[in-house]
Amino acid sequence: MEQIRKYLESIAHISDEDWEFFTSKLVRNVVVKKEVFLKLHEIENHISFIESGIVRLFIPKENDERDITFGFSFENQFISAYDSFLTRKPSLYQLQALTKTSMLSISYNDLQEVYKKTQIGNLIGRLTAERLFLIKSKREQNLLNLTAEERYLKLFKERPQLIKVMPLKYISSYIGVTAQALSRIRKRIS
C-alpha cells in the first residue's frame, strides 16, 4: 500500500481520512505469468495499480502470431481497459500479465463511492485518464513519425528490461512490423 501512496503523494497530498477510505476499497490481486485477466468482450470492472510486473494490452486474432499488441503497463502505473470501464461496455481487447504481476485493484462501484466521498478519487480518475491518453497519443505519434527501427530503439531506451522478459513477437507487433522485419532490424543494429 505504501507504493501506491508514494506514487499518488508525488502528485498531491492525500489526507489520512481519504487514504483510509480509499485503501479500504483496494484488493490485492496476483496474476500468474501469461494469464489473460480481462478477456475480449468482458466488461472491465477495475482500475489497478501495478505493484510489480508487466501487463500487455492486445487485440486477439484467431492465430496467436497475428495478435496486435498496442500497449504495455509497468510497475507504478495504472492499468485498465479504461474505455470499457467508463462506458460499461464489453472490451474490444484483452489484458495479459507477461510476468507474475501484483496489482492493487478498485472496482467500478467502489471507485464511484470514493469519488463521492473523497478528493483522492478524482485524482485517481484523472491520473488514469491522463496516463492512458498519453500512451495512446505517444504510440500514434511514434507510428506516424518514426521508422520501425527508431520505434524499436526508443522502446528499449525507455524500457531496457523488456528485452529480457518480453517475447519478440509482442515487440514486433507493438512497433508495427512482422517478426521477420524485427529480426532484420536487430541484426542491422547489433
Image (cartoon, rainbow, N blue to C red):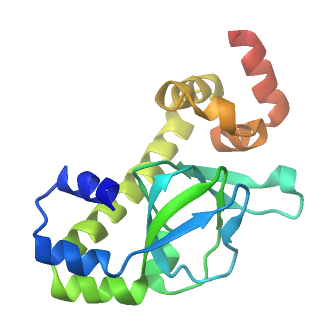
Residue shown at the point (45%, 55%) measured from the top left: 51
Give the side of residue 90 with respect to residue 178, left or right: left
Name which residue lies at 57% across and 31% down. 161
Screen quadrant of the C terminus: top right
At x 88%, y 64%, the residue is 62
Seen from the viewer's position, the closer of residues 103 and 184 is 103
Quadrant containing the N terminus is bottom left
x and y percentages locating residue 146 in the rendered image: 54, 29
Q: At which x and y percent is residue 100?
A: 63, 54
In this rendering, position of residue 77 left or right of residue 35: left
* Vertical relation: 74 (above or below) 127: above
Q: Quadrant of residue 151?
A: top right
Q: Residue 9, located in which quarter of the rendered image?
A: bottom left
Q: Position of residue 173 (x, y in %)?
A: 71, 44
In-front residue for pair 17/49: 17
Of 165 and 169, nearer the camera is 165
Depth order, front residue of 99/64? 99
Give the image location of residue 188, x and y in percent.
74, 11
Image point (55%, 86%), residue name: 89
Q: Is residue 153 left or right of residue 39?
A: left
Tag count: 0
* Location of residue 154 with respect to 33 vertically, above or below: above
Q: Is residue 2 left or right of residue 92?
A: left
